[in-house]
Image (cartoon, rainbow, N blue to C red):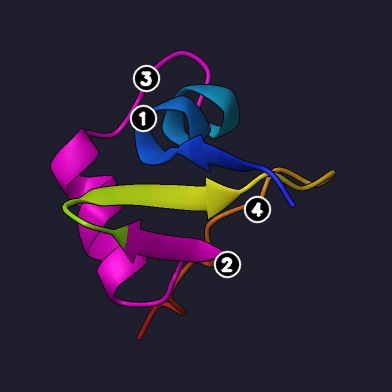
Amino acid sequence: MSKITLAEWKEKNFPGKVPSLRTCQNWANEGRIPGAMKMGGLWFVKATEDGGRCERRAEK
């Protein structure tokens, strides 16, 4: 399965106002981005048909 960088993933999934790379790294570290993996010092996301949308936290 192919992988894309976290920067490519955020541009693909958030057209218009894009969250910062650091925010996306935090989401990946928390497990909120399906298929995210850290290789060395870089984050990658498995390229999928649905784009691997970020899981939102439920409001309290």
13 with respect to 48 (left or right): left
The residues bearing labels 2 and 4 have C-alpha atoms spaced at a distance of 6 Å
**Could you tell me the amino acid type at mark 4?**
Gly
1 or 59: which is nearer to us?
Answer: 1
Among the two numbered marks 3 and 2 on one chain, the one whose residue lies closer to the N terminus: 3
The residues bearing labels 3 and 2 have C-alpha atoms spaced at a distance of 21 Å
The residues bearing labels 2 and 1 have C-alpha atoms spaced at a distance of 15 Å
41 or 58: which is nearer to us?
Answer: 41
Task: Name above or below for residue 57 compared with residue 19.
Answer: below
Q: Quadrant of residue 7?
A: top left
Provide the secondary structure element on which disc 4 rests: loop
What residue did someone put label 4 on? 52
Q: Quadrant of residue 32?
A: bottom left
**Could you tell me the amino acid type at mark 1?**
Ala
What residue did someone put label 2 on? 34
Among the two numbered marks 2 and 1 on one chain, the one whose residue lies closer to the N terminus: 1
Provide the secondary structure element on which disc 2 rests: loop
20 with respect to 51 (left or right): left
The residues bearing labels 4 and 1 have C-alpha atoms spaced at a distance of 13 Å
Among the two numbered marks 1 and 3 on one chain, the one whose residue lies closer to the N terminus: 1
What residue did someone put label 3 on? 17
2 with respect to 59 (left or right): right
Q: Are marks 3 and 4 in contact (CB under 8 Å)?
A: no
Q: Are marks 2 and 4 in contact (CB under 8 Å)?
A: yes
Q: Which quadrant is the C terminus positioned in?
A: bottom left
- Count residues near mark 1 (Cα–Cα under 10 Å), then give few for <14, some for 14-19, many for 20+: some
29 with respect to 2 (left or right): left
Q: What is the residue that sits farthest to the bottom in this orientation?
A: 60
Say if the magenta span includes residue 15. Answer: yes
What residue did someone put label 1 on? 7
Say if the magenta span includes residue 55. Answer: no
Q: Residue 30 in the image: state x and y as whole percent.
A: 30, 77
